[in-house]
């Protein structure tokens, strides 16, 4: 072999493709939950109904003016019509005056 054989050196390829979606900046955080309307989104697994009751109680204790739109208003976030539900959330949130959401996904 010649001195220029580059023995032990290999060409490599990056295993991931170029980004297809441009990164977007996050929505600004709320300064407080006082006076805000909070949506509860759930996949109907585990005990989300109980978890949301506990979260709501704790949040209301700290922010008495917080309001909640119950998970039952939205349906199963991972059910057979998941794509339609998710696509409609921005409009639904606007109609209901939602400022924030808690999304609970159980394992």
Image (cartoon, rainbow, N blue to C red):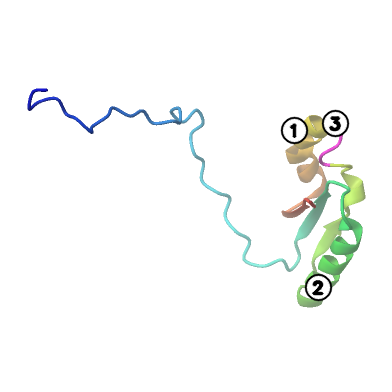
Q: Residue 102 carries which label?
A: none
Of helix, strand and loop, which one carries label 2? helix
Where is residue 74? Give x, y as percent.
Answer: 87, 44
According to the picture, the residue beneath numbered tag 1 turns out to be 87
Give how far apart the Cα atoms at labels 3 and 1 are.
10 Å
Q: How far apart are marks 3 and 2 (CA)?
A: 31 Å
Residue most extreme to the left: 3
Instruction: From the viewer's side, name the closer residue of 100 and 6.
Output: 6
Local crowd at mark 2 within 10 Å, few (<14), some, or many (≥20)?
Answer: few
CB atoms of marks 3 and 2 within 8 Å = no
Residue 56 relative to residue 25: left or right: right
**Label 3: few (<14), some (14–19) or many (≥20) C-alpha neighbours in 10 Å:** few
> In the depicted view, which residue is nearer to us: 55 or 45?
45
- Determine whether 74 is above or below 51 in the image: above
Whichever of callouts 3 and 2 sits on the residue coming sooner in the sequence is 2
Instruction: Identify the residue shown where x is 81% and y is 35%.
Output: 85
Q: Nearer the viewer, mark 3 or mark 1?
A: 3
Label 2: which residue?
58
SS at badge 3: loop
At x 16%, y 29%, the residue is 6
**Label 1 environment density (alpha carbons within 10 Å; few <14, some 14–19, many ≥20):** few
Magenta span: helix, strand or loop, mainly?
Answer: loop
The numbered mark, 3 or 1, whose residue comes first in the sequence reads 3
Say which residue label 3 marks: 81
Residue 32 vertical position relative to residue 90 in the rendered view, above or below: below
| Residue 69 at x, y percent in the picture | 86, 54
Element under label 1? helix
Q: Up-down: is 106 above or below 78?
A: below
In the rendered structure, which segment of residues is drawn in magenta? 77-81
- Closer to the observer: label 3 or label 2? 3
Is 93 one of the magenta-colored residues?
Answer: no
Residue at the (81%, 73%) spot, across then down: 58
């Amino acid at each position: 072999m010649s001195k220029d054989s580059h023995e032990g050196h290999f060409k490599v390829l990056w295993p991931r493709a170029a980004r297809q979606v441009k990164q977007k900046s996050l929505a600004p955080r709320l300064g407080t939950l006082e006076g805000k309307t909070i949506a509860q989104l759930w996949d109907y697994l585990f005990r989300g109904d109980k978890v949301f009751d506990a979260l709501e109680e704790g949040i209301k204790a700290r922010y008495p003016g917080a309001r909640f739109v119950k998970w039952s208003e939205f349906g199963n976030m991972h059910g057979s019509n998941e794509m339609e539900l998710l696509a409609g959330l921005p409009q639904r949130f606007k109609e209901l005056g939602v400022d924030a959401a808690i999304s609970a996904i159980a394992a």
